[in-house]
């Protein structure tokens, strides 16, 4: 049999056509009935009037109006999809349409998430607004501290354009902490699943381009974008083997110990001011602790496999991590000292005045600390040139030699999420977090017309002021640099790794730590004038260097893009200029 | 209600893995059980709003000490599975010490009035902890760091290459 046989696809084309017609009829009719029902309930219970907003009406509006409306629209969309499936399929066959649908979907989801965060902020504002007595929301599960009436009043007083009671009904459930937490956990889990899937495809494409080949090109049409999901499905179906001589319990436990801590780190990693699951006052320490626990999983995996290559990998991981954690923590202390807090949201808030206020340009010590942190973070994520625990050319596959199938993929989920987390820490501590590189005066002004205001708010929230999209873009750049380094630099030997840490990086971070302490003491506490002058001079020079680096990066990127099909070597037809 | 539930879950994790640490004959498995104990205690600290203490517990014990233990076992062991095989004298000594310790702890538990503490609503500020460490508790703090320095010099002395 050449095709998969699906139970709902009849073998006989004529029968299949009747199936299809019935499906279209039922879907469209069901959808219209639901929408009519929803509208009827809306009219009958008078849900649209601002005057009588009660908590009973919330239940009616959610169960009786919003739910049938959503179901009805979904059914109608499904019916239309079946009706036009041939046309849709023909359109999606062209790679560019499929890719634009995919990227349009991603952008749409990002905008939706942003809207969602606005709603959260709004409900927080409402709880803190003076007419509610500035009370803090209580943590109890079924305790609503605001009634729908109060929400409607707040809306009509502060946001008259939104004062439809339906909005109040939608906002009312959002004051429950439990609901927010569930939504946020859903968001974190979704994001954590997308990072490795996208990151692995991106890495393979970059590796391909750096080695004058194409990388994955087939699956999904446009540049093989569906390669990672396809690999994921393949891994799920592979046989899961455990060596008989392995320590069974620890062998099974190790992948989870590698996979769960980076996700836990996401709990405290803020994406923007209000976009954080728990805004811990010790967020930085918590994330470092989680990255440290990840190592335990890797060591256990190597140990439990009972294989000498795995044990070599695990031992290398252990000594590499134990030594590189020290310079990593010490270089992170420098921005923490400058900011005076361990709370990541508070640290990023101090860098909001445009790119010259970012901590990396603050003074020479922070500038060096950024690079020493970045090097140490490469080692802590076991990325090349520090990928000795894995080093596939010497140790088969290092600590995960014996793993296969889903357990194997968990290690990669953990590694790619940890890569994003360390990039995120670097962005928050040194590169302004979610703040825009433009000074605050750059933000667009509203002019009162509602649609212009809407566009202005969207652009400010996404690009010109602050927003999680800026944070993700900056982190993605550092993530890209990690991939770039991996495919550019050769792996170094274990004694070189330890030499680089103990005799180069560690003394360097000690010197910058001492320098930064004296600097802060001299400028902020003793107020030495000439030191202040030197400091502002160095600050200006560093900003200039940063601007030159950014422009150079853009120029290199443009140059690479405009020469993207030209290769190097004696066999190519289209040569790179100058080769 | 939720907090009580979380407390019982974390307390159960701590106790069960603590029993595992003692009962397991394989030293690496003991170390993994120790991870459960330390993590459970850190979670209890989080429940008590002592965020700094919990994070430090995770970094120092779970992320540092535990890795060193496993690392030491891997470097020193000859067979792949290190198994505890105590002699009779060791067992007798351990039993005596454990009974003494248990009696002492029980007497302490029963014979004392335990004051009820008040719950903290917010985590104490990290800055205050730092200030206290460097003012009121400077001598114990420095004594601990001198102790660590001595240990480090001793370890370096033991590990230096023979000349």
Image (cartoon, rainbow, N blue to C red):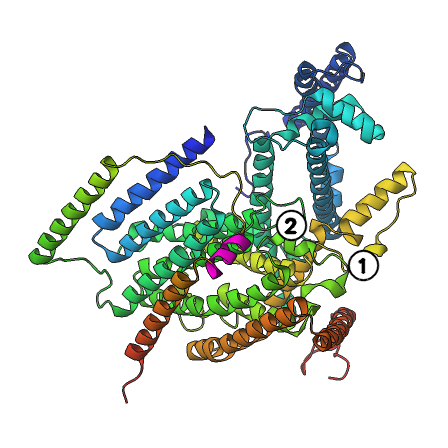
Above or below, A7 relative to B61: above
Main secondary structure found in the magenta portion = helix
Residue assigned mark 1: A439
Q: Nearer the viewer, residue A111 or A197?
A: A111
Do marks 1 and 2 share a chain?
yes
Q: Quadrant of residue A566?
A: bottom right
Residue visible at 70% across and 21% down in the picture: A148
Q: Which residues are magenta?
A: B126-135
Residue visible at 71% across and 41% down in the picture: A89
Residue B97 picture location, percent across and down: 15, 51
Give the secondary structure at mark 1. Answer: loop
On screen, residue A467 versus residue B30, left or right, reads right
Question: Earlier along the polypeptide chain: callout 1 or callout 2?
Answer: 2
Residue B119 picture location, percent across and down: 46, 36
Tell me if label 1 and label 2 are in contact, CB under 8 Å. Answer: no
List the single residue furthest toward the bottom: B163
């Amino acid at each position: 049999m050449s095709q998969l046989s699906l139970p709902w696809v009849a073998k006989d084309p004529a029968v299949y056509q009747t199936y299809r017609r019935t499906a279209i009829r039922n879907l469209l009719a069901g959808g219209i009935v639901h929408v009519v029902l929803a509208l009827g309930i809306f009219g009958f219970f008078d849900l649209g009037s601002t005057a009588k907003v009660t908590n009973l009406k919330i239940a009616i509006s959610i169960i009786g109006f919003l739910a049938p409306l959503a179901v009805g629209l979904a059914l109608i969309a499904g019916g239309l999809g079946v009706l036009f499936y041939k046309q849709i399929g023909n359109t999606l066959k062209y790679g560019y349409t499929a890719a634009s649908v995919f990227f349009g979907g991603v952008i749409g989801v990002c905008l939706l998430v942003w809207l969602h965060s606005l709603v959260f902020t709004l409900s927080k504002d409402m709880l803190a607004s003076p007419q509610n007595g500035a009370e803090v929301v209580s943590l109890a599960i079924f305790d609503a501290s605001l009634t729908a009436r109060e929400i409607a009043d707040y809306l009509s007083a502060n946001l008259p354009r939104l004062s439809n009671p339906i909005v109040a009904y939608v906002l009312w459930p959002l004051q429950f902490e439990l609901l927010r937490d569930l939504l946020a956990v859903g968001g974190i889990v979704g994001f954590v699943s997308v990072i490795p899937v996208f990151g692995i495809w991106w890495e393979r494409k970059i590796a391909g381009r750096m080695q004058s080949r194409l990388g994955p090109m087939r699956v999904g049409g446009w540049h093989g974008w569906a390669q990672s999901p396809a690999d994921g499905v393949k891994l799920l179906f592979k046989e899961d083997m455990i060596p008989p001589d392995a320590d069974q319990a620890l062998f099974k436990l190790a992948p989870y110990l590698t996979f769960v801590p980076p996700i836990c780190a996401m709990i405290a990693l803020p994406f923007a001011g209000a976009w954080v699951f728990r805004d811990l006052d010790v967020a930085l320490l918590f994330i470092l602790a989680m990255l440290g626990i990840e190592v335990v999983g890797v060591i256990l995996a190597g140990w439990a496999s009972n294989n000498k290559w795995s044990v070599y990998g695990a031992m290398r991981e252990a000594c590499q991590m134990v030594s590189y954690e020290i310079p990593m923590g010490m270089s992170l202390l420098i921005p923490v000292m400058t900011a005076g807090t361990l709370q990541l949201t508070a640290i990023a808030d101090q860098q909001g005045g445009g790119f010259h206020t970012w901590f990396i340009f603050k003074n020479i010590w922070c500038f060096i600390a950024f690079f020493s942190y970045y090097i140490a973070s490469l080692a802590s994520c076991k990325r090349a040139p520090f990928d000795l625990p894995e080093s596939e050319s010497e140790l088969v596959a290092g600590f995960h030699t014996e793993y296969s199938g889903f357990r194997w993929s968990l290690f990669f989920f953990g590694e790619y999420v940890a890569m994003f987390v360390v990039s995120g820490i670097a962005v928050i501590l040194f590169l302004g977090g979610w703040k825009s590189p433009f000074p605050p005066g750059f933000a667009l002004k509203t002019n009162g017309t509602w649609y212009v205001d809407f566009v202005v708010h969207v652009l400010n929230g996404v690009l010109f002021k602050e927003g999680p999209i800026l944070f993700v873009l900056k982190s993605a750049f550092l993530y890209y640099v990690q991939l770039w380094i991996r495919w550019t630099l050769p792996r170094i030997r274990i004694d070189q790794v330890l030499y680089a840490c103990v005799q180069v990086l560690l003394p360097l971070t000690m010197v910058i730590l001492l320098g930064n302490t004296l600097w802060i003491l001299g400028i902020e506490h003793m107020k030495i004038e000439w030191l202040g002058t030197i400091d502002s001079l160095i600050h200006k020079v560093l900003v200039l260097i940063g601007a030159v680096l950014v422009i150079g990066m853009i120029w290199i990127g443009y140059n690479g893009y405009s020469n993207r099909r030209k290769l190097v070597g004696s066999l190519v037809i289209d040569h790179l200029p100058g080769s | 209600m939720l907090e009580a539930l979380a407390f019982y879950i974390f307390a159960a994790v701590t106790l069960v893995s603590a029993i595992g640490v003692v009962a397991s004959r394989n030293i690496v498995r003991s170390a993994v059980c120790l991870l459960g104990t330390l993590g459970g205690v850190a979670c209890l600290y989080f429940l008590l709003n002592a965020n700094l203490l919990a994070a430090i517990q995770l970094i120092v014990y779970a992320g540092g000490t535990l890795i060193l233990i496993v690392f030491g076992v891997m470097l020193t062991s000859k067979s792949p599975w290190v198994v505890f095989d105590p002699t009779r004298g060791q067992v007798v000594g351990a039993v005596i010490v454990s009974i003494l310790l248990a009696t002492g702890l029980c007497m302490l538990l029963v014979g004392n009035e335990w004051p009820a503490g008040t719950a903290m609503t917010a985590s104490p500020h990290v800055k205050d902890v730092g200030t206290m460490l460097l003012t009121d508790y400077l001598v114990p703090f420095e004594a601990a760091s001198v102790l660590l320095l001595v240990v480090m010099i001793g370890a370096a002395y033991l590990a230096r290459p023979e000349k």
